Amino acid sequence: MSAATEYDLHPEMARIRYRGLPEPLALPMPLRPLASADTVAEKLPDGRIRYSIRHDVLRGVTPRMLAWWFANLEGDIAFGGQRYNRYRFWHPRDHVHISYARRRPDGTVGPGAILRLIEVLGRDERFVVDTRSHIERLDEGGYVHNPEFHGRTGFARMEYRFERVAGGTLYENCLIIGATGTLLSLATPLIARFAFTAAKGQAWFRHNVEEVGQFEHFLPHLYYEETGHRE
């Protein structure tokens, strides 16, 4: 059984681990270039490192669609007469698996839910992301989740901001590497040197710009197909 098939058959298994890259999906949409966004890597006063992206406006995409998407990452998408795993469709080269390892008591996805995700930035196996991430915020204004590092949170944070503008949505997001607090902050230099290097940060920039750019190609139609709403 191939890695791709195995992931697709068992999305509910939070214990699943990375077993190799599936073949890229052959989709006709070009990926957005890194130069289409403004990116900044900076060291914060507390020693943490922040990788920030201000994307080009997402045309035809609304904040409501984005909030819905992050609560509905599991499942398939129909395109060109075929069905694809929607997470892999979102980035046809780098994405491997996503599922909700834990939902809220009512079955929905939002603060308190946990993601299980696997991706390989730039298809470079030095940059495998294989983790669980705890959702802190999910609404039309933005999205925040906290990836685990060796089974605990507090060493990485992902923040997203959505703002409706003329013609679409301004999408800004950042990844913050390192911890705060007297003891935990001692681990920040080690994480930056060995676990999330500057090279991995640059790969994350490109990966994120590419996946966010994909929204224009599929999200408005998928949202309408599944909700019956245009925006």
Image (tube, grey):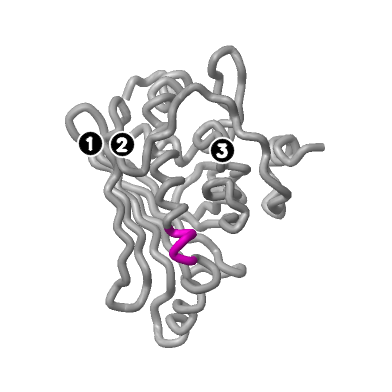
Closer to us: 137 or 145: 145
Image position of 124 (left or right of 224):
right
> In the picture shown, does residue 33 fall above or below 25?
below
Hey, which quadrant is residue 75 in on the image?
top right
Please name the residue that numbered disc 2 is placed on: 63
Closer to us: 190 or 97: 190
* Type of amino acid at the residue the image marks with label 3: Arg
| Residue under the point 47% across and 61% down | 199
> In the picture shown, does residue 190 fall above or below 116?
below
Which element carries disc 2, helix, strand or loop?
A: helix
* Type of amino acid at the residue the image marks with label 1: Arg
What percent of the width, then of the height, locates residue 27?
53, 24
Mark 2–mark 3 CB contact (< 8 Å) = no
What percent of the width, then of the height, locates residue 2?
77, 38
* First reached walking from the N terminus: tag 1 or tag 3: 3
**Residue 185 visible in rendering:** yes
> In the picture shown, does residue 120 fall above or below 197?
above
Q: Report the Cα–Cα distance between label 1 and label 3.
A: 29 Å
Mark 1–mark 2 CB contact (< 8 Å) = yes
| Residue under the point 42% across and 35% down | 68
Q: Report the Cα–Cα distance between label 1 and label 2.
A: 6 Å
Closer to us: 133 or 130: 130
Which element carries disc 3, helix, strand or loop?
A: loop
Q: Nearer the viewer, mark 1 or mark 3?
A: 3
Q: Residue furthest left?
A: 166
Disc 2 packing (10 Å; few <14; some 14–19; many ≥20): many
Q: Nearer the viewer, mark 2 or mark 3?
A: 3
Q: Report the Cα–Cα distance between label 2 and label 3.
A: 25 Å
Magenta-drawn segment: 197-201
Which mark is drawn over residue 93? 3
* Type of amino acid at the residue the image marks with label 2: Pro
